[in-house]
Image (cartoon, rainbow, N blue to C red):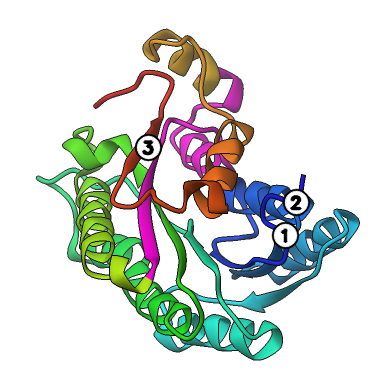
Amino acid sequence: MNRLKNKVIVITGATKGVGRAFARAAAEEGAIIVGGGRDEAAGIEMMKEIADAGSDGTFVPVDLNNIEDIRKIFRIAYKFYGRVDGYFSYGAVTDVSPLDTCTEEVFDKIMDINFKATFFACQEAIKYMKKTVGGSIVLTGSAHAWGGQKDRAAYACSKGALRILMEHIAHNYAADQIRCNYLTLGWTPTEGEIALRASQGESEEELRQRAAGILPMGRMCEVTDYLEALIYMFSDESRMMTGSTLRITAGEYI
């Protein structure tokens, strides 16, 4: 349908989960994808999927602990394609982090990747979007941002901080035609979630069964459940949408 035709979209965390699924879906809608991640083999596979979708793109190795890597992906996007129209911040970690036992090491890991990296990525996105005619930033949120489960204290704080960052950008950069919105994801069996539960002795099938009994709509969200919302949020159809929180959570409100 070409709803994103020729839009240059930068994605961090592009080789896994929702990031990779959106890269493919956006390419099918005509977007040019500049995807970053640590897994170079997965990045090469992602670029093949984008080419198969009939679009163009570039993979950039990115470690979200390295601010220079973050600057590099935006620099490459602008150098290769002359613009940055969108930024999707997806990369994150979800380590167990109860308030009463969370270590400083775990806290720093979560905040550095989930918040600090996104803060400076948004700085870069805004810098390049100002050079053209604005753009759309979408931050990946979580239902944990409204308090969170007991074993996700640091994670909840990181996602809450992103919600404030979204509102700050939306309020202060609207005059530059730069939009920012917060997509609240539900409980999703991504590679990271499955690996975390496996480390706790729970299989994917057991996880899905347990989640089905908890979530009001009776099943976990799949990565494909978010794609239409993301396409809309990066398209011109949502050009007057900024400062919004969009929930796709199977009825989950923590």
- Where does label 3 land, which residue? 246
In depth, the one of 100 and 163 nearer the eye is 163
Which numbered disc flags the more N-terminal residue, 3 or 2?
A: 2
Alpha carbon distance from label 3 to label 2: 23 Å
Say which quarter of the image contains residue 151. top left
Check if residue 185 falls in the magenta segment: yes
Q: Amino acid at mark 2?
A: Asn
| Span shown in magenta | 177-206
Q: Residue at x 55, y 33 (%)?
A: 189
Mark 2–mark 1 contact, CB under 8 Å? yes
Mark 3: few/some/many CA within 10 Å (<14, 14-19, 20+): some
User: In what element is the residue under mark 1?
Assistant: loop
Mark 2: few/some/many CA within 10 Å (<14, 14-19, 20+): few
Report whether residue 94 is seen: no
Check if residue 123 falls in the magenta segment: no
- Where does label 2 land, which residue? 2
User: In what element is the residue under mark 2?
Assistant: loop
- Where does label 1 land, which residue? 5
Q: Position of residue 37 (x, y in %)?
A: 59, 68
Quarter the C terminus occupies:
top left
Q: Is residue 172 left or right of residue 40?
A: left
Mark 1: few/some/many CA within 10 Å (<14, 14-19, 20+): some
Q: Amino acid at mark 1?
A: Lys
Report whether residue 202 is seen: yes
